Image (spheres, rainbow, N blue to C red):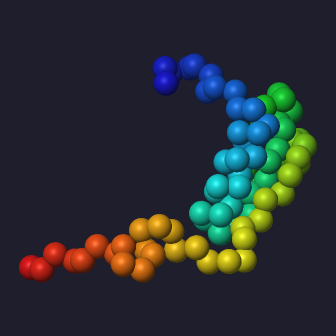
Amino acid sequence: MLYGALPPVMTEERACYYAKALAHSMGITFYLVRSREGRFLAVQIPSDDCEIRATVMPSDRVDDGAQFRHGQIPEAAEV
């Protein structure tokens, strides 16, 4: 990205996808908001001057991820 260039504008659907992915992976609540300028963002703490479009909470289930499923943990190298 060039200095001073604006980041690409995110659609509401894309911002919602990011909010869901972040909430799931980090285990904390994220908000889909529309800023005063009309941009859609996934944030942890919404500012007072934005519109909260959705609240995305992490799921209650634990998902260790594919790399930690049975039989897929790599063996540690012996020293």
Q: Residue at x 75, y 32 (%)?
A: 11
Q: Residue at x 72, y 42 (%)?
A: 15
Q: Nearer the viewer, residue 72 or 33?
A: 72
**Residue 61 location, x and y as percent?**
68, 77
Query: Residue farthest to the front?
Result: 71
Left or right of 11? Residue 50 is: right
Q: Residue at x 71, y 52 (%)?
A: 19
**Residue 73 location, x and y as percent?**
34, 75
**Residue 29 location, x and y as percent?**
74, 63
Q: Which quadrant holds residue 28?
A: bottom right
**Residue 66 location, x and y as percent?**
47, 67
Q: Is residue 70 visible?
A: yes
Number of marks present in the image shown: 0
Q: Work out whether 74 lies above or below 15.
A: below
Q: Work out whether 66 lies above or below 73.
A: above
Left or right of 61? Residue 76 is: left
Q: Residue at x 16, y 75 (%)?
A: 77
Q: Nearer the viewer, residue 74 or 40?
A: 74
Q: Nearer the viewer, residue 33 or 24?
A: 24
Q: Work out whether 6 lies above or below 57.
A: above
Q: Which image quarter is the C terminus in?
A: bottom left
Q: Which quadrant holds residue 76?
A: bottom left
Query: Residue farthest to the left?
Result: 79
